[in-house]
Image (cartoon, rainbow, N blue to C red):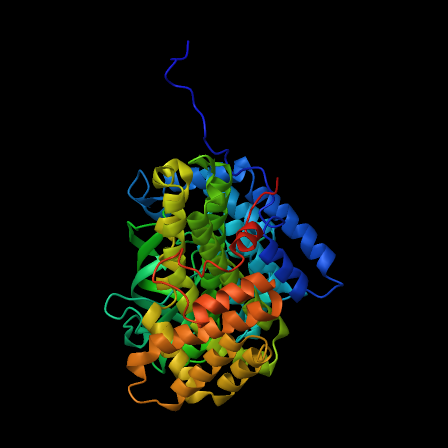
């Protein structure tokens, strides 16, 4: 018999059983905008299937299980033989299998492939973000391998396969493979040119033996890795398979798994190479140039993944506020909470629109779009990934104490949020990359200005921000110390221009007034009260009545 003092009321129903893609108006509009009509019906169908799966109780349970049961390292078998294997919970494999079958490692050869994949990655990240690491690196390995047509012919069909096969064995006997990457070393961090891993050439063409240590190597159970090592001709890029063509294990000594803040479902390892067989990719001495396209593609996934985390956090906050009654009415109708939610929704929408515009640039693959990406991508990676932690933290607060407990899912999002700002180059690296693009590639600034110029004249605050950016670029005194400020301005001007062109007037007006016009405080919930904030919040609702 229930106690008479324990009648449960005013609790919010779980956000489950909905289509994560279809209920995201910003993302679905971006897909319709960037995918050509002939491909659009297929894209919408596949994204709808993925969106319904991501919003299901089953996927949410997989995500919780994969994080509650982190991977476990087994260095030796019971007899003392070295095996260097990492065991994952079955939920991890189910998440990966669903993602691979949905084409989240297949973008480079499909029509509108990058937009379709980015939208799918943004959707599926909301089910669980940790397994996005091997998905991202597998997808991003393709352009690096294409520097060697012989290697690409063998590996690309396996990398882009829609079949997930777990377990280590000869990769050429598998229907699909996953890839990882190893660049970071103890002494260097982001300064990869200080790497000390040695590569000694063998008599076979392109074959080397590696000796050294990688301080961070994510997803160590992948089938192959692209790594940097110092060959006689200088720092070079190599392909390291876990299993050799004859079926024997390559030397890949996993020393330990990192105990991380978040991303706990994914294994990040320290790895030793000691006579490890590797195949040269590209030319000796041009390792950074060879692997840089892989880095760029994973940086885009940092933007897309952060947009996904923001969207899920904002969806949870809006959903909670819709059903929670306080002081005589729904929380969402209270003016101050509406201001907070609108502010969060703005940040999420701006991140999504920007991420999808960058993906569309990859699909276009013209000289102008490549120049645009050279500047826009590091600026976006810098700004969007930094905004992610602030957005998720504020969204958690919207749920109050309910958001602080693990069962809400928000703590997991908050632990995950800082990762994308660190992975593939932290904030300073991205800001300095913006400076390099400005100094070495004038066409990058030209392409950027052409892009934002498409919205000039539509909003006076955007016009003033563009002018202010150009004024700041005219004075390069102490520019390195101002690199973060510049990267932020590039990102905000680009987001503002995209929203002015494509978002509803109330969204663009609120963004320009706050982010570009200066009518904004230092915390969320400080938007001008006179704007149409209710419409901004309504647009972000994940489920309609």
Q: Is residue 320 left or right of residue 55?
A: left
Q: Residue at x 47, y 40 (%)?
A: 320
Residue 144 coordinates in the image, percent (x, y) = 50, 71
Q: Is residue 280 visible?
A: no
Q: Residue at x 42, y 81 (%)?
A: 286
User: Which of the pair 82/391 is nearer the observer?
Assistant: 391
**Quadrant showing the N terminus:** top left
Residue 228 coordinates in the image, percent (x, y) = 37, 71
For residue 203, which quarter of the picture?
Answer: bottom left
For residue 195, which quarter of the picture?
Answer: bottom left
Residue 123 coordinates in the image, percent (x, y) = 55, 51
Most extreme residue toward the left is 187
Q: How many marks?
A: 0
User: Which of the pair 246/433 is nearer the observer?
Assistant: 433
Most extreme residue toward the right is 38
Q: Is residue 123 left or right of residue 84?
A: right
**Quadrant showing the C terminus:** top right
Q: Is residue 410 left or right of residue 512?
A: left
Whether residue 185 is situated above or below residue 320 in the rendered picture: below
Whether residue 415 is situated above or below residue 60 in the rendered picture: below
Q: Is residue 27 visible?
A: yes
User: Which of the pair 54/481 is nearer the observer?
Assistant: 481
Whether residue 39 is situated above or below residue 486 in the rendered picture: above
Residue 6 coordinates in the image, percent (x, y) = 38, 19
Q: Residue at x 25, y 65 (%)?
A: 186
């Amino acid at each position: 018999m229930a106690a008479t003092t324990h009648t449960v009321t005013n609790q919010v129903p779980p956000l489950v059983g909905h289509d994560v893609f279809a209920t995201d108006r910003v993302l679905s509009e971006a897909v319709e905008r960037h995918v050509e009509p002939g491909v659009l019906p297929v894209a919408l169908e596949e994204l709808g299937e993925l969106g319904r799966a991501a919003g299901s109780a089953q996927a949410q349970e997989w995500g919780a299980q994969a994080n509650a049961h982190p991977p476990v390292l087994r260095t030796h078998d019971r007899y003392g033989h070295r095996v260097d294997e990492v065991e994952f919970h079955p939920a991890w494999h189910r998440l990966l299998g669903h993602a691979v079958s949905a084409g989240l490692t297949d973008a480079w050869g499909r029509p509108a492939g990058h937009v379709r994949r980015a939208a799918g990655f943004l959707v599926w990240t909301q089910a669980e973000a940790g397994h996005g690491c091997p998905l991202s690196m597998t997808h991003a390995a393709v352009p690096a391998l294409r520097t060697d047509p012989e290697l690409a012919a063998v590996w690309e069909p396996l990398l882009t396969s829609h079949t997930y096969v777990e377990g280590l064995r000869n990769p050429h006997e598998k229907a699909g493979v996953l890839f990882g990457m190893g660049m970071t070393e103890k002494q260097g961090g982001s300064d990869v040119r200080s790497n000390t891993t040695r590569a000694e050439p063998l008599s076979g063409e392109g074959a080397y033996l590696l000796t050294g240590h990688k301080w961070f190597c994510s997803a160590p159970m992948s089938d192959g890795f692209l790594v940097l090592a110092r060959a006689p001709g200088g720092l070079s890029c190599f392909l390291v398979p876990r299993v050799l063509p004859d079926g024997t294990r390559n030397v890949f000594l996993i020393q330990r798994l990192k105990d991380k803040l978040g991303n706990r479902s994914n294994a990040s390892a320290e790895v030793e190479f000691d006579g490890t067989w590797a195949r040269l990719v590209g030319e000796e001495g041009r390792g950074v140039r060879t692997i840089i396209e892989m880095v760029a593609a994973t940086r885009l996934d940092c933007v897309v993944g952060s947009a996904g985390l923001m969207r899920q956090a904002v969806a949870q906050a809006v959903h909670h506020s819709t059903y929670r009654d306080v002081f005589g009415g729904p929380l969402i109708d209270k003016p101050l909470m509406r201001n907070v939610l609108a502010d969060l929704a703005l940040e999420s929408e701006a991140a999504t629109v920007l991420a999808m515009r960058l993906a569309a640039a990859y699909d276009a693959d013209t000289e102008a779009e490549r120049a645009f990406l050279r500047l826009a991508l590091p600026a976006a990676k810098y700004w969007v990934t930094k905004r992610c932690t602030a957005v998720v933290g504020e969204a958690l607060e919207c749920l109050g104490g309910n958001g602080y407990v693990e069962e809400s899912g928000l703590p997991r999002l908050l632990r995950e949020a800082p990762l994308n700002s660190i992975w593939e180059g932290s904030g300073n690296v991205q800001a300095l990359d913006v400076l390099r693009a400005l100094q070495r590639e004038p066409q990058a600034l030209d392409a950027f200005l052409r892009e934002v110029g498409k919205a000039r004249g539509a909003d006076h605050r955007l016009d003033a921000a563009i002018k202010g950016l150009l004024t700041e670029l005219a004075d390069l005194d102490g520019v390195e110390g101002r690199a973060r400020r510049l990267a932020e301005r590039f990102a905000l001007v680009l987001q503002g221009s995209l929203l002015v062109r494509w978002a509803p007037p109330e969204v663009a007006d609120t963004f320009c007034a706050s982010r570009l016009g200066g009518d904004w405080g230092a915390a969320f919930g400080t938007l001008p009260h006179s704007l149409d904030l209710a419409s901004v919040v309504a647009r972000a609702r994940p489920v309609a009545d």
